[in-house]
Image (cartoon, rainbow, N blue to C red):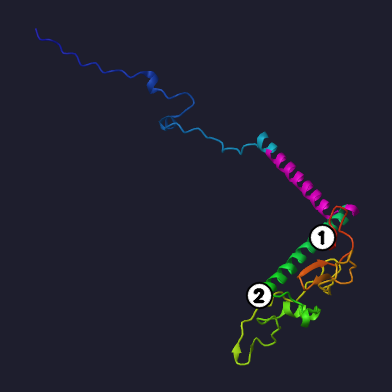
């Protein structure tokens, strides 16, 4: 008996796979799914912290302007009369001390170079004009003022000048004049302010010729 061969079974496709999805045609079903559309990023709203920092900044600027204005006002405000007068008196006393120390140092330098105090004319008599010239111009070994340092064909050692302008002015009365005292003449009991200075050329001592004192607690001008 001859066996009967049956044809192989053909696999059957599912009806669900063959059918397109509802609402889509065949062309649309073949396309890949599109990516989702995203909106552009929105600028962040200012935070409360930033607003607080700006407020603090303007507060600081305002405070700085107020303080600066108060300082300018305080500087421009005139000092009350008594305080202003006291400050002026103390400043004047300090200036007198400085100038007096300067002229004393100049006299000492002249003495160290020449062995005599400046301002002594012939026979030791005081000469105010000679004093100013000996301080303001070059001098020789004997203290004589040299109009031309090189004279007679030989060069002499020049000393000075010791101070430009000669004797400085008294800061209080503005006078550079000097009242000379003899070697045996006592110092006056009080200054009279008629000259800037009192000077004894025999000893080189110089004092301020002013009456009174700068203020109650200060020493007398004559005793500086």
Q: If you read the primary sequence from the N terminus, does the residue marked by circle 2 or circle 1 appear first?
A: 1
Give residue 7's quadrant in the image: top left
Q: Residue at x 75, y 80 (%)?
A: 133
Work out whether residue 71 or residue 55 is closer to the camera in this orientation and state it: 71
Left or right of 166 in this view: 152 = left
Give the residues drawn in magenta, as a range: 53-82
Work out whether residue 97 or residue 113 is closer to the camera in this orientation and state it: 113
Residue position marked by numbered label 2 in the rendering: 113
Work out whether residue 43 or residue 137 is closer to the camera in this orientation and state it: 137
**Tag 1, which secondary structure?**
helix
The chief SS type of the magenta part is helix
Query: Measured from the top left, where is residue 113 in percent x and y?
Result: 65, 75
For residue 106: magenta?
Answer: no
Left or right of 115 in this view: 173 = right
From this view, report whether residue 131 is shown above or below residue 193.
below
The answer to whether residue 121 is seen in the rendering is: no
Q: Residue at x 87, y 65 (%)?
A: 210
């Amino acid at each position: 008996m001859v066996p009967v061969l049956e044809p192989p079974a053909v696999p059957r496709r599912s009806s669900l796979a063959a059918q397109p999805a509802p609402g889509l045609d065949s062309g649309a079903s073949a396309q890949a799914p599109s990516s989702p559309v995203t909106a552009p990023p929105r600028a962040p709203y200012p935070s409360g912290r930033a607003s607080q920092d700006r407020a603090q900044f303007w507060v600081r600027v305002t405070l700085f302007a107020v303080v600066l204005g108060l300082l300018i006002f305080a500087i421009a405000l005139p000092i009350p009369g008594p305080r202003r007068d006291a400050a002026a008196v103390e400043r004047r006393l300090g200036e007198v001390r400085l100038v007096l120390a300067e002229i004393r140092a100049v006299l000492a330098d002249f003495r160290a170079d020449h062995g005599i105090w400046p301002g002594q004319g012939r026979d030791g008599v005081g000469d105010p004009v000679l004093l100013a010239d000996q301080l303001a111009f070059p001098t020789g070994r004997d203290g004589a003022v040299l109009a031309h340092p090189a004279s007679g064909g030989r060069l002499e050692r020049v000393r000075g000048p010791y101070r430009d302008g000669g004797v400085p002015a008294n800061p209080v009365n503005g006078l550079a004049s000097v009242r000379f005292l003899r070697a045996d003449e006592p110092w006056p009991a009080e200054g009279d302010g008629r000259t800037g200075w009192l000077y004894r050329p025999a000893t080189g001592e110089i004092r301020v010729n002013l009456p009174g004192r700068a203020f109650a607690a200060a020493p007398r001008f004559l005793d500086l």
